[in-house]
Image: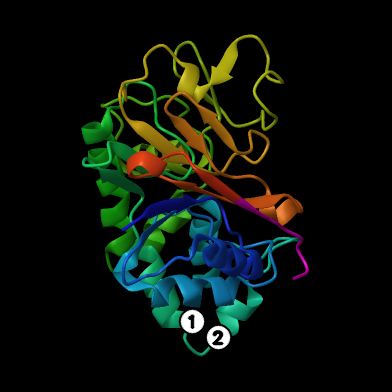
Amino acid sequence: MATYAIGDIQGCAVPFEELLDDLEFDPARDRLWLTGDLVNRGPHSLETLRMVREFGDSVTTVLGNHDLHLLAVAEGIRKIRPGDSLKRVLRAPDRDELLHWLRHLPMVHVDRDLKALMVHAGVYPGWGPSKLLRRAAEVEKALRRDDYPDYLRGMYGSEPRAWSGKLAGMDRLRCITNVLTRIRFVDGQRRMDFDQKGPPGSQPPRLMPWYQHPRMKCDGWRIVCGHWSALGFSLQGNIISLDSGCVWGGALTAVRLDGDHSRQCWQVGCGVNE
């Protein structure tokens, strides 16, 4: 059995299928981790959702910001933006089943045997794996309740920018959501910055990538993430960053996580019009 992690697909179903072929992925034998953002901007969001759902328990997917955006659009909370490619999902006969499945996906995945965890964007400095799971569970609970549209209405926005255990209500859920699905840079006081989206080194001196903050608490754990296409594919210490910009004409990347083959990687070149 092999365990592979693949970065943000964003509706690029053809490169996804090609990469699975290169891996010789067998859902009866192997396991697949997906870093979220299954949908949007690429041409085949509907096919991607159907394919991943059909793999069943052999695939573990965490939710990304584009997946949450799809749920908000489906509820009429947000309008489709220029560049979105969600209309075929919203018009599909199996739309309701796919959206129900999507909002029951986890925000974080932790595998203690592999000593690895997966999140779409990153981990807040000061949160270890156990605290990360507890915070993620708060958002998962909100998404799975009957009144989940209330959460979707309140999740947008960039405040508060720093975590506090005293946060409550929607401020608390929004802060957790932003950590898990949007974080890139933080300052020395662990305040998140959402304006800077370039690669590490392009930010003002007061900021640093979240994984370089001295308060990081995931020592000994590999952190698998996506989201940050300007960072791209990177194996830096315990960070496995897998968003290599497939939807922008880059590549879709896979890394093996288990055993003697750990850190072996594969890439398939992408374009947005497959």
Residue shown at 33% from the left, 55% from the top: 106
Camera-side residue of 200 and 82 = 200
Residue 210, image x and y in percent? 49, 24
Q: Would you say residue 84 sits in the magenta stretch? A: no
The correct choice, above or below, for 74 with respect to 6 in the image is below
Residue 94, image x and y in percent? 47, 86
Q: Which residue is mark 1?
A: 95
Q: Is residue 17 visible?
A: yes
Do the CB atoms of the residues marked 1 and 2 lie less than 8 Å apart? yes
Residue 216, image x and y in percent? 37, 19
**Stretch of the chain drawn in magenta:** 267-274
Give, as a three-letter code, the residue at label 2.
Ala
Numbered circle sitting on residue 92: 2
Give, as a three-letter code, the residue at label 1.
Arg
In this rendering, position of residue 128 left or right of residue 242: left
Residue shown at 42% from the left, 24% from the top: 162
Q: Is residue 147 visible?
A: no
Answer few, some or many: residues within 10 Å of disc 2's Cα (few below 14, many 20 plus, some between 14 and 19).
few
Q: Alpha-carbon distance for marks 1 and 2? A: 5 Å
Q: Which image quarter: residue 131?
A: top left
Q: Callout 1: helix, strand or loop?
A: helix
Q: Callout 2: helix, strand or loop?
A: loop
In this rendering, position of residue 171 left or right of residue 114: right
